[in-house]
Every structure is written in structure tokens, then in C-alpha cells.
């Protein structure tokens, strides 16, 4: 796409293109910036350490990019980046919303926004929850390959939390196939009696699944079908969080292997 605008716009376009392209001609084609301007910008980026010549007429990202990225990521707080989308989702639906990050074989709540209902969910920030029993957890598992899912199952033992919990490996794999197709997961009183949730996966800047967000309510307050009607909003909020975390393009339904 052709870049119109200031020299700063063109410099940033070239710097971004350098992540995937190395030849001046390819960078010019990707950015719409003339080859002479690309070459001039690259020379400036080399002086600043953001690019380096490879000795063969092409360029690679320079060490200063890694240094800067390291400093930024050291201060990067996923919960803070997600809070706006989480709050907006809670306000739009009236339900309690959660953001959890995968930690080994469980998910840990890192943010929670209470809904407008006259009750509060028993969850709390810092609480760890099983992957196979929760909407967030199943949304995470659906983004993994079957072998990875089975390895987790065998480590955790698929503990039965309620009479609705999926405790069989094959049943869980079939369920996750449906999650992939829909783009969201449900918890229909599978983790705690009387609580229902809808969740969607969140991805990080590398494109890998990081965790997920969800809406939660008491079963007596909402049927599963009415809660699932809000799934598009949950998916959209999860994409917003993924974008805030640097994910270029969060995968959609059926984009991951079964």
C-alpha cells in the first residue's frame, strides 16, 4: 500500500516492513515508498542501530530493536492492556467479566470487572482454575494441538468438579473441535454448580494463545442459550485485547488444527 505523508510515516513503514522483508526493492514494494527513499531511511536506521546490513546488499533488524523491545516488555502488564475492553464488555452485557492467563496446566485470573447483577462471582484475581472445566480454559485448549491437550489431560487427570464436567479425553477433544468451529467456549455449570460462562481466547504479540476473557453469571439468572447470544461480543472483546497485546491478527474459527 502506498504511503502518503510525512517522513516519519515513511520511516515507520520501512521499519515495520523490515520485520519481513530484507531487500530494498521488496521493502519499497511492500510500503509504496520509493527505492531511493527506502535506501536513505535504512541508512539512518543503521546509524541508530535499528537496522544492519547483511553484507550482501540486504538489511536485517538491528540490535537496538531487541533492546527496546526488552525494555518495553519488562514493563508490559497484560492486565492493564486488557482492562478497557474488559470493562466495556461488562458494561455492555451487564455480566461479570474475567481475563485469565495460562500458567502451565491452569489459567490464572489477572483481572475481573463486576457486572450489574445484585450479586458477585466467587472468583478473585490470582485464583487458578482448571483448563478443562472453564470457558476460558477450554478456549485456550482449543488453540492447542490434540497431542498437547492430551498431555495436559494426563498431567491433570481431568478432575471432576461437578456432574457436568467433561472427564473423558475423547469427549473433551470432540468438545474442543466444536469450540474451534464456533470461536468461543462455554462453561455450563462444569466448574462450579450454578455458574455459567462464555469465553474466547486471547493471543499475544507472537500469535500464540496467552489466555482468554469471559462473561459469567448465575445459572438461575440466565439460560445457556441466552448467554451464548452474547458470544459475538465476547469474541470481539477478545480480539480487542489481543490487538492491545500486539497480536497482528487473532485467529478466527477453524484456523487451528483439530
Image: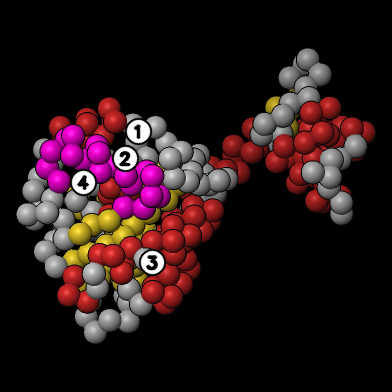
User: Is the residue 53 above or below the residue 2 in the image?
Assistant: above
Residue beneath the point at 18% across and 70% down: 219
Task: Calculate the distance from the C-alpha at mark 3 to the C-alpha at mark 1.
Answer: 25 Å
The answer to whether any part of residue 102 appears in the image is: no
Q: Earlier in the sequence, mark 3 or mark 1?
A: 3
Relative horizontal placement of residue 227, taking residue 196 as reference (left or right): right
Task: Calculate the distance from the C-alpha at mark 2 to the C-alpha at mark 3.
Answer: 20 Å
Q: Earlier in the sequence, mark 1 or mark 2?
A: 2
Splitting the image into 4 quarters, where does residue 45 fall? top right
For residue 258, the mark is: 1
Counting from the top left corner in percent of width and height, residue 27 is at: 79, 32
The residue indicated by pointer 2 is 177
Relative horizontal placement of residue 213, taking residue 147 as reference (left or right): right
The residue indicated by pointer 3 is 230
Counting from the top left corner in percent of width and height, residue 110 is at: 33, 59
Circle 2: element type: helix
Task: Calculate the distance from the C-alpha at mark 1 to the C-alpha at mark 2.
Answer: 6 Å
Residue beneath the point at 12% across and 42% down: 167
Q: Name the quarter where the N terminus is drawn.
A: top right
Circle 3: element type: loop
Q: Are marks 1 and 2 in contact (CB under 8 Å)?
A: yes
The residue lying toward the viewer, choosing from 229 and 76, is 229
- Can you name the residue that lies furthest to the front here? 225
The residue indicated by pointer 4 is 132
The residue lying toward the viewer, choosing from 103 and 192, is 192
Amino acid at each position: 500500500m502506498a504511503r502518503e505523508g510525512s517522513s516519519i510515516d515513511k520511516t515507520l513503514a520501512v521499519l515495520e516492513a523490515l520485520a519481513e522483508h530484507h531487500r530494498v526493492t521488496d521493502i519499497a514494494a511492500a510500503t509504496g515508498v520509493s527505492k531511493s527513499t527506502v535506501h536513505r531511511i535504512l541508512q539512518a536506521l543503521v546509524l541508530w542501530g535499528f537496522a544492519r546490513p547483511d553484507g550482501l546488499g540486504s538489511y536485517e533488524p538491528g540490535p537496538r530493536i531487541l533492546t527496546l523491545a526488552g525494555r518495553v516488555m519488562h514493563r508490559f502488564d497484560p492486565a492493564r492492556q486488557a482492562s478497557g475492553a474488559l470493562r466495556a464488555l461488562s458494561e455492555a452485557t451487564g455480566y461479570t467479566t474475567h481475563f485469565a492467563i495460562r500458567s502451565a496446566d491452569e489459567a490464572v485470573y489477572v483481572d475481573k470487572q463486576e457486572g450489574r447483577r445484585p450479586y458477585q462471582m466467587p472468583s478473585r484475581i490470582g485464583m487458578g482454575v482448571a483448563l478443562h472445566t472453564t470457558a476460558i480454559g477450554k478456549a485456550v485448549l482449543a488453540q492447542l494441538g490434540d497431542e498437547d491437550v492430551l498431555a495436559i489431560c494426563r498431567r491433570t487427570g481431568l478432575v471432576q468438579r461437578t456432574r457436568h464436567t467433561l472427564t473423558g479425553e475423547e469427549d473433551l477433544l470432540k468438545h474442543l473441535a466444536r469450540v474451534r468451529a464456533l470461536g468461543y467456549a462455554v462453561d455450563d455449570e462444569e466448574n462450579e454448580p450454578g455458574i455459567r460462562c462464555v469465553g474466547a481466547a486471547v493471543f499475544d504479540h507472537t500469535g500464540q494463545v496467552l489466555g482468554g476473557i469471559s462473561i459469567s453469571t448465575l445459572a438461575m439468572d440466565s439460560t445457556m442459550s441466552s448467554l451464548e447470544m452474547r458470544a459475538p461480543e465476547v469474541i470481539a472483546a477478545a480480539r480487542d485485547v489481543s490487538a492491545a497485546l500486539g497480536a497482528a491478527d487473532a485467529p478466527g474459527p477453524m484456523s487451528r488444527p483439530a
